[in-house]
Each structure stands twice: as structure tokens, then as C-alpha cells.
Image (cartoon, rainbow, N blue to C red):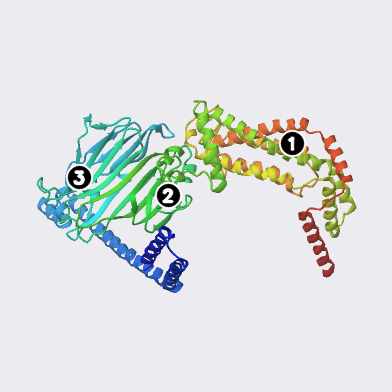
Amino acid sequence: MSYFCTKFCIYNLNTLTTTSLIMNRDNILGLILIFVILIGFSIWNAPSEEEKEQMRRAQDSIRALREAEQELIREKQALEKETTNEEELVLEDQEVPDSVKTALLKDRLGLFAGAATGEDRIITIENDLMVIKVSKKGGHPYSVELKNYKTWDQQPLMLFYGDRNEFDLQFYSQNRLVSTRNLYFTPETRANESNGTYKVSGEDSITFSMRLYPDNHTQGLPKYLEYKYTIRGNEYMVDFDINTVGMYDVIASNTSFFNLTWNKDVPRLEKSRKNEMNNTTVYYKFLNDEVDRLRETRDGTEKLSAGIKWIAYKQQFFTSVLIAGESFNNAVVSTESFDESNEDFLKRMESNIDIAFTGGTDNKIPLSFYFGPNHFNTLKSHDLSLESQIPLGWAIFGWINRYIVIRVFNYLDSFNLNYGIIILILTLMLKLVLFPIAYKTYLSSARMRVLKPEIEELGKKFPKKEDAMKKQQATMSLYRKAGVNPMAGCVPMLLQFPILIAMFRFFPASIELRQEGFLWADDLSSYDSILQLPFEIPWYGDHVSLFTLLMTVSTILYTKMNSQMMSTGTQMPGMKTMLYMMPVMLLFVFNSYASGLSYYYFLANIITFIQMYAFRFMIDEDKIRHKIEHNKKKPVKKSSWMKRLEDMQKQQQQKTRQRK
């Protein structure tokens, strides 16, 4: 109804516009009245909130029924898989006659019994960045090696390999559950082979297909399930299409989805197993929503509702992503950690994904794989929010890293400098930007330091606890007369805080620092070790990081110097002890962190020392004292904030008297 109302209103408005010269006032009023009536009728016929709620409940019920139906199908598939595993044991038994094995295969796989036997061969596809090996058994990627990277112990970097990676497409054929993982595919390609390897470079690309043929396939009437790979020479992204051709009488006509199981045992790639574990999990993105993930520090399972754009098996610096052309229907994702005694693998990641399929016709299901580094610009170039896997921090901290730090870092990187020098220049630039803020902080402290004797006198004048309110009022009155804002030093420090946290997130997440050495550190993305301990200290580790020691010592020295140069006599009891305890606590936290981060904080402390000595000569406290004395002689105008504060103090005093 609303559609016709809108069309009618548009028609009348157009008529009104084009014939306004010949219309009289009554015609125009009539059209406006019709317009108002139609709008009112549309509003009157709009569903009420109760009706909308009923519609939402109905949609939720339908969705729940569909999910329940798919859950039942998955349970049935799981039961049939158990039966299949038992039959496979029988097939592997050498004493079972071949005729019995053939009958079992025919009974279990129907039209795919012929595909249950074949040559277990590996096809290698290589571009400028990676080597992908595809197995005829299952037709899926068997392993992926990234050519430009090595593991922490300088071995070829494999994202996954062998039986540690499972990729299984399941569907029904003649009331039988067919699993592609144990069926043999036939390779099809027009590319030229060289020593058993298909190579592509630069802007070129090759297309490579693995086809699963049923027993009733013929040349004249082709029928097959196809995995179609398209690989470009200089990209980590691989197009992966799942196609069905002529499978109308092979795959059940009432099939509405394929079930895809993708499991991967994540290999250890980095020096610090603990850090890599804490940065390894499953990420996923909903079609019209933000990127989310499973918790890194604990195992978990999550059921994802309709509309999933991609699922990623993310490690500290590398990721494997399965991307939908449109979206996945539903999925269940999970992680399970291996015991610390397992030095080779970190976690097992699993995904059970429903992919939309239309029975009774040919299908093309466009998917993609990303096998590559967690490099911000590389991931961002695909415009899929893949860069959200890099933990740069939330809100303002992430914005600082994305729009400032990364851009400056990449600019410095373009000069091919050592990364230790780049961190030094980056620190100098940040300190230069923050120089005005640091100056204002020191200036505020100098003003407070000039007033210190008078504040101490007020302490002597009001020594009793019950006079605390009077002392506070007198102190605020002194600040007001002197023209000093006690909060002036806090605001600049708060402005520096987001950059401090942004750097804390940036350095451990930067793949650019991976295996880049500087001075005694052989990997700025991991801890530096000058001494390997024969035992492990709780919360500290089994090694000594020199950059962390330098950071800790410089922080303690800075704290001491800051207390001497900027002391105002208003420090809270116990605060001094806590200020000295914090660097010691950070020693335990940072000992296993990225050495690039400890190096940055050490540099920041050294530059701060220099700044403070410079401020000492730049700021004349005698001039500040004369200015304060001059301000005291001026008439004082209370600010609205000060007036409110005094009113609150008076109210507090009245309440105190009433209690007495």
C-alpha cells in the first residue's frame, strides 16, 4: 500500500510542479489535502509495535527452526562419519577380500565409490610470495609456505602442512553422506608444468582446478564437483571457487547447503611461545557488522549466526583466512590449546561452516583464501577489514596507530634504515610533538613549587584533622589569588597518555620488527636475552632482557629526578613508594615482551632527562615568583567552577556541624 501511496504522491507533486501556472488556489489545496490524507492513511495502516514484535518473533522462530534443522543434519552427519571411520578400518584390513571392500565402498559412497581409490599425489603451485601444495586426496591445500619469511629457528615458514590441516566438504548423494577429504580429485589445468611445479610471477596468473568425478560422469555428459584455484604472481590472496557441473542427479535436489569443515593445528613460528599463544585465536567478521574473535587466553566455542563474511586462523604475525564471496550461512568456531610440552604446535582451530547451495542446478560458490603476513597495509588493501586482526588498540589508541604512527613508521622505513634507528627517530619525533605539553607540565610544577612554602605554612596553621576543610579552602584561596591552576599539570599528562598506550600496542604487533636485529637484540619483535638462566623465576622467566633492565633503571632514575625537581609538597602518603615500585613491577611484565618496546621506553626516558634539564634553564622561578606576587595584588574574580567548589565545601561543613 505504501508503495502505491508514494508513487501517487510523487505523481501529484510532479503535476503540481509542471502545471502550477494554470492551477488555482483550490486545486493546490486539494492536492495538498490528498497528500496529507494518503500520508495519514499510510501511518494509520502501519503495523503497531505489538504487530512488529509479533513479526520479529515469527522471523526468530523461522530462523530457530532452520538452525535446528541444520543442527539435526550436522548430528546425522557426525553419526554417519563415525560409521564411515569404522568402515575405513575394515577397508584397511589386509585380510578382508577385495570383493567385500568394493561392495562396502559402493554401499557407503554410491556414485563416488570409484573416487575412493587413486594416486595420493601432491601438485605444487608457486608464485613470488608463497608455495602452495594441493593434494589429490581431498583436492584441498595440503601446505602453504611463505617464501619471504622464516620461523624463529630459521626453518621454512609453513602456515600449515600435512594431516595437521583438514578441509572437508560434505553433502548427500543418494541418501549417503559424502565427505570429500578421503576422495581423489583429478587435476585440470592449461598451465605449463616445470619439474612438477606450476609457477607464476609478477602480474600474471594461473587457474588450476581439482575435479571430483562421480561414477556416472562421461565426456558427453560431464558431471563433477570442482575446486577452482586462481593464483596471481605477486599476491597472497587466492581465488577459490567451488563449482558443481551437471550434478543434478548426483547431489540431492533438496540440498540447500554444503557443510564445510576446516580444521588446522597451528604451528609455532615465533621465539616466544607464550607471546605467540597470547596472540593466536580465531577471528571472524559478520557481513554487516564489526570484526570479533574468540578469547586468546582461553579455549572456547562460538556459534555464529547468518551472514559471516570471513573466518581467520590468526597467529601473532601471520594468518590464514577463508573469505566468502557473499556470506556464509552459519558457522561454529572453536579453539583448543595444546599442552606447553608440545613445542611444535600451539592450538587446534576448528570451523564448521554452512555454505548456501541450490540443488537441481549448476552452482558457482565464490570463495577466497588469504595466506600471508599480518602487515597492516597489505591486509587493508583488500578492503575486507582484515587489518582488524592486528591488535593496535581500541578507540583513540587504535586511531593514533592507524593514522599517525604507522604512516610515519612506513615513511621512515622507505629510507631502508636499521629498525633500531627508525625507532630512535620515531621517538625523537614524538617527543618533539609532545614538547609543548611537557613544557606546560613543567611550568605548572614550577608554579606549584614556588607556592610550596606558603602551602606548608597553611599545613602548620591547620594541623588538626577536623580543620581539613578549612585548610583546603585556604589552599584554594591561595591558588586563586596567585593565579595558579593546580590541575594545569594533569591535563598535559593526560594528553600524553594515549600515545603511551598506542606505542605499547604498536611495537609487539609490528611484523616489520620481526627478526630485525639491533645491537645485542636479534629480534626486536621478541625479547632480547643477554643471559639464559638455568631455572625459571615465577612471573619473570628464564632469561634476562637487557633492554628491559635499561628501561627499568632509567625509569627509577627519572622518578627520583622528577621527585626532586618537581616536588610540591602535596604528594599523597605512600605515593612515593608506589612510584618506585611501578618500574620494578614492569621489569617482570616487560622481560618477555618485544625488545623494541622496551628500547622505545628507554629512549623516551633518556630524552625526557634532557628535556627536564633544558626546562630547568629555560624557566626562571624568580620571574614566576614575582608574577605570582603581582597576581595576589589584583582583584580576584571567582570562576564559576571555583564558586561551585566553595559551595560544595560549605555544604560539607554544614553537614559536619549537624552530625556533631
Q: Amino acid at mark 2?
A: Tyr
Query: Which mark is on residue 156?
Result: none
Binning the other alpha carbons within 10 Å of mark 2 as few (below 14), some (14 to 19) or many (20 upward) gives many
Give the secondary structure at mark 2: strand
Quadrant in which residue 369 is drawn: top left
Query: Which mark is on residue 211?
Result: 3
Quadrant in which residue 611 is drawn: top right
Measure the alpha-carbon separation of dots 1 and 3: 72 Å
Q: Image height check: is 43 above or below 466?
A: below
**From where the camera sits, is residue 485 visible?**
yes
Give the secondary structure at mark 3: strand
Residue 63 x, y percent position in the rendering: 35, 65
For disc 2, the marked residue is 283
Q: Amino acid at mark 3?
A: Arg
Residue 526 x, y percent position in the rendering: 51, 36
For disc 1, the marked residue is 561
Measure the alpha-carbon separation of dots 1 and 2: 45 Å
Residue 273 x, y percent position in the rendering: 47, 41
Q: Image height check: is 350 above or below 523?
A: below
Give the secondary structure at mark 1: helix
Looking at marks 1 and 2 on the same chain, the residue that comes earlier in the sequence is marked by: 2
Q: Image height check: is 88 above or below 375?
A: below
**Residue 255 left/right relative to 492:** left
Looking at marks 2 and 3 on the same chain, the residue that comes earlier in the sequence is marked by: 3
